[in-house]
């Protein structure tokens, strides 16, 4: 009889209630493991941070099986947060890939039991080359723990599930400890969001990390007028080529931004039969002292402001308060939080937020 057929014969029918109960129990057990791990952290964690900071080379991560898969993820996390790293498969290392190691490196070895032969052999070989090792393992009394200069102790971990066989809670603990290492290292290095952006140029994340200046509408795409001009004069003479913005930025005599008037504001005047206002100074109906943002700010900050305040246009000003650009909601709509409601009322009036022009 095949294994699949045997398993089918032994299969137990779960109700949805039982399935959910067991799933919640597994997640809670892993969460409890992480809380215990957090409370167990001591000065050895700081020693590991110092060892990596002082290494002029890379963090070479090694592990096999499920621990190796966690190690590959941590290698990527280190690299993306400012710590040079490389994953070294233990088996490949013992067949020639040890040549990638340099005396300036530091090895981070992952093994819950601390008795994985291939991993211990890699650490022994690294020692012969004068390369220090940080062990991420259950106990400093294990073979791996006794070989390492620094031990990040996971402690005795009970794997999740009714049988407790598959690496689950232990790999979750490894992942969390590695993430903590990577992020504390990143902060210790003074790694900035701008540096992070350079390493993540693609996709939605990369776009969010671009500066406002890179995305804003500017120059001929803007509509800028004096606050003393009439609405009729502004809209009959002030056009914009290319991407048409739905807002006019109003400036005072010194050229500083004093207000904002949008297409929606104009529509509201007409709906209210206030056509006489069209020949009055726009300063009487403009939104005074509108929210603004600096051109060097991250685009994610602009998105947060648009979302939180339910506005459609965000002027960009220089250090003197003069308008130099504009972020329009239609330019960043793909980056807006999914919970944002396009039917919410705008802060500056009663018209619907974010009309698509």
Image (cartoon, rainbow, N blue to C red):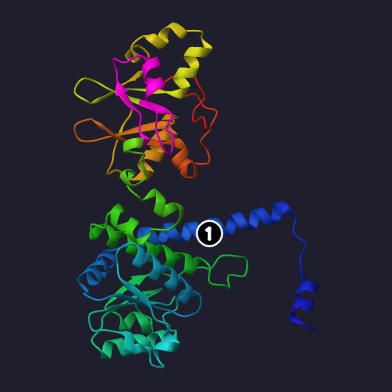
Q: Residue at x 20, y 35 (%)?
A: 319
| For residue 46, side relative to residue 93 (left or right) | left
Label 1 SS:
helix
Q: Residue furthest front?
A: 237
The structure residue drawn at horizontal position 52% and vertical position 24%, both measured from the top left corner, is: 352
> At which x and y percent is residue 176?
41, 62
Q: Quadrant of residue 75?
A: bottom left
Specify the segment rendered in magenta. Answer: 221-248
Residue that badge 1 annotates: 29
Please state if 39 lies on the left or on the right of 254 as rendered: right
Picture layout, residue 347 above or below residue 308: above
112 w.r.t. 198: above or below: below
Q: Position of residue 73 (x, y in %)?
A: 44, 68
Picture quadrant of residue 206? bottom left
Residue, far bottom:
95
Instruction: From the viewer's side, name the closer residue of 285 and 223.
Output: 223
Q: Was residue 129 drawn as part of the magenta stretch in this picture?
A: no
Percent x, y for residue 128? 26, 91
Identify the residue at horizontal 41%, vertical 20% (top origin).
236
Label 1: how many Cα within 10 Å (few below 14, some 14–19, many 20+): some
């Amino acid at each position: 009889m095949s294994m699949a057929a045997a398993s089918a014969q032994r299969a137990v029918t779960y109700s949805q209630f039982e399935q959910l109960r067991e799933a919640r129990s597994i997640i809670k057990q892993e969460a409890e493991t992480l809380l215990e791990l957090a409370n167990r952290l001591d000065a050895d964690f700081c020693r590991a941070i110092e060892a990596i900071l002082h290494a002029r080379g890379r963090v070479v991560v090694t592990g096999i099986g499920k621990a190796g898969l966690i190690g590959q993820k941590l290698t990527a996390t280190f690299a993306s947060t400012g710590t040079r790293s490389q994953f070294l498969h233990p088996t490949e290392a013992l067949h020639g890939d040890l040549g990638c190691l340099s005396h300036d490196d530091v090895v981070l070895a992952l093994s819950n039991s601390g008795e994985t032969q291939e991993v211990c052999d890699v650490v022994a070989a690294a020692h012969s080359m004068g390369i220090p090792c940080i062990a991420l393992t259950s106990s400093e009394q294990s073979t791996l723990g006794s070989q390492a200069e620094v031990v990040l102790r996971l402690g005795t971990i009970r794997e999740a599930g009714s049988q407790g066989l598959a690496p689950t809670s232990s790999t979750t603990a490894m992942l969390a400890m590695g993430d903590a290492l990577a992020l504390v290292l990143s902060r210790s290095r003074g790694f900035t969001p701008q540096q992070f952006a350079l390493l993540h140029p693609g996709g939605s994340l990369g776009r969010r990390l671009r500066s406002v200046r890179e995305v804003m509408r500017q120059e001929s795409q803007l509509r800028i007028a004096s606050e003393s001009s009439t609405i009729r004069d502004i809209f009959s003479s002030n056009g914009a080529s290319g991407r048409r913005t739905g807002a006019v930025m109003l400036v005072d005599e010194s050229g500083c931004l004093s207000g904002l008037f949008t297409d929606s504001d104009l529509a509201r005047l007409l709906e209210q039969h206030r056509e006489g206002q069209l020949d009055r100074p726009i300063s009487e109906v403009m939104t005074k002292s509108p929210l603004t943002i600096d051109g060097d700010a991250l685009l994610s900050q602009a998105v947060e402001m648009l979302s939180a305040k339910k506005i459609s246009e965000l002027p960009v000003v220089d250090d003197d308060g003069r308008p130099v650009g504009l972020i329009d909601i239609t330019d960043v709509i793909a980056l807006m939080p999914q919970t944002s409601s396009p039917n919410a009322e705008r802060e500056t009036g009663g018209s619907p937020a974010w009309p698509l022009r």
